[in-house]
Image (cartoon, rainbow, N blue to C red):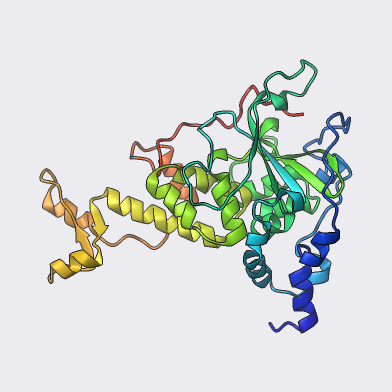
Amino acid sequence: MSLDNNKVEELKNYPLGEDQLSSQPKMPRCRPGSSSPPLKPSDPISTASLFTPRAFPPPSLSGVPVDYIMDQLHTLASQYWDKPDTADCTLVIPVPHARGKAGFAFPDMPAFSMSSESGLGRRVTEPALNSVPRISLKLHVDYLSAHSTFLRGLFSGASTLDLISSAALSEAPSRPSPSGQFSVPENRLPRLMPCSPDHPILFLPIPDPSSIHLLVHWMYFGSTSYIEDGLNNGSVEWEGIARNVEYLGLPAEIKVFLGRWYASWLHAQRGGRYGSDEEEEDDDEADTETVYYSDDDDQSDDAEDSSPAPASVDLNAAIAADDTDDAPKRGRTRTTRPLSTSSASSI
């Protein structure tokens, strides 16, 4: 689909154009003493604090391919990565089970600021939401909405419960509760916190907080290199990232990457791995795949296990299988995070 010059220039300047940044005031913060009522699961997310919904793509870019918009966002990413002064949204992510400081395993990763709040020392009258540690990320709505269908729906004013129920029905249509509704603990529901109309603050209890910085980097730059490094060196879990991908409704591109990495890991666990170019030069009879066998393994069984790894793996099936088997886990050793914690009740 061809684009006229006016449309292209409009895309380049909306909503993160340099001409707008110079005149755009710093986004106001939420008043700490705000008395806005809590968001009920059945209410539109915009009722919590009169947040102005933002559709994506915006009406001014109707007709522009989403893929083109995403490519332009990736091109501009270095100008907005770790720029809290230009951020127009904040994600507040609870961390009930601390697993170290995210990002410290990636010294060469571009800077990324995350503020941490322990929630200690709160008054008795304050919401229980503050009783668990949490991280705060100041980000840009367009980068999140372009990649996450879940966040796109929330920022456009959709009901949290409707979005979760729709996603659950599409993945498991035969598992609703007897009442016909999917049972989701209230403290596992995203909700809009009191904030200004043009700077939403979203409480987002994602499955694995320790890997969120890697997914945010991918949303901004479109590169999976740091995710792959984290999986290879064991600093993050494959299961955690996969659950975050499903929770956020990220596109097929990242799912294909995770499926291929999983297939490669599974293939290596069965005793096979791909040889390097140097190994092929040393052995003229070697194939593109070099397989190592242990002395105790039966040769016939090993031959079956040395088949090429599949190109992709169903994420939902892989996650479900991992919950029931005793095989080594992808990435670092996993500490199970419960779906619901008594210390983080809804507000």
Give the residue at x 81% y 47%. Answer: 199
- In-image side of 199 versus 339 (left or right): right
Residue 261 is situated, as x and y percent measured from the top left of the image, at 40, 55
Exactly how many numbered labels are in the figure? 0
Which quadrant of the figure contains the N terminus?
A: bottom right
Give the image quarter of residue 34.
Answer: top right
- In percent of width and height, residue 64 lies at 73, 74
Relative image position of residue 296 (x, y in whole percent)? 11, 43
Is residue 186 rendered to the left or right of residue 326?
A: right
Judge whether residue 106 can be spotted in this image.
yes
Q: Is residue 35 above or below residue 138?
A: above
Taking depth in this image into account, of 83 and 41 the one nearest to the observer is 83
Which residue is the extreme one toward the front? 22
Q: Position of residue 99 (x, y in %)?
A: 50, 32
Q: State the residue in front, 236 or 77.
A: 77
Task: Using the image as rendered, state which of residue 175 and residue 281 is in the foreground.
Answer: 281
Q: Is residue 231 left or right of residue 18?
A: left
